[in-house]
Amino acid sequence: MPVTDITKDLDNRTLTLTARFAAPAQRLWDLYADPRQIEQVWGPPTYPATFVQHELTPGSQTRYYMTSPEGEKFCGLWDITSTDEPHGFTFIDSFADADFQPVGEMPSTEATVCFTADGDETVMTWTSVYASAHDMQKVLDMGMEEGARQATNQIDDFLARHPAA
């Protein structure tokens, strides 16, 4: 399993997921940069993702939805703030309505994804910073930790089936 740690720090409003992959940083960057690849691993396995707009460039917006087993769609937005290929990217992650407009009463987070080479492997560190401890607790209560673990743990199988982008 790629996830090696999930650290929750309510005092600092941060949730940090650390994972290790037997792939170079560029391969992980390519997975996250390609909408057809990332939709294969984004979200829990029972909530497949569809990316309708995605480009890892500063100022761009990613729009996607996950579909529940019952067919309900849950939409999300990423406002990409910076990129450093193949080392990582930052973005504002928000819940969205069916028209891909932010849902104001739902928390958004500032997310930083880093890919760090470690020999033949890459360590991915995903840090989310919330506006308040209450916002962070809200997403934790919704199952964010387990969903992130399930999604990230799909990456190894995907990379084994698709070793090159």
Image (tube, rainbow, N blue to C red):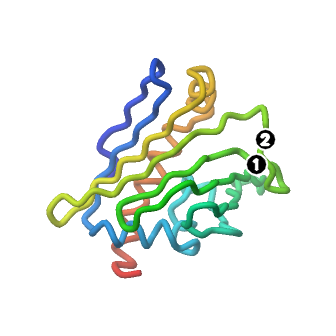
Q: Is residue 144 left or right of residue 98?
A: left
- Residue reaching furthest to the left: 119
Q: Earlier in the sequence, mark 2 or mark 1?
A: 1
Q: Nearer the viewer, residue 156 or 91?
A: 91
**Residue 162 rendering spot, x and y as whole percentages:** 39, 79
Q: Which residue is mark 1?
A: 96
What residue do we see at 81% from left, 50% from top?
A: 101
Residue 17 visible, this angle: yes
Q: Residues within 10 Å of mark 1 (few under 14, many from 20)?
A: many
Residue 117 placement: quadrant:
bottom left
State which quarter of the image contains the C terminus. Answer: bottom left
Does residue 86 appear to the left or right of 146 in the view shown?
left
- Disc 1 marks a residue whose amino acid type is Ala
Residue 85's spot in the image, x, y percent? 40, 67
Which residue is labeled 2 in the image? Answer: 103
Q: Given the current orientation, which residue lies at the most extreme top position? A: 11
Residue 11: image location, x then y, percent: 46, 18
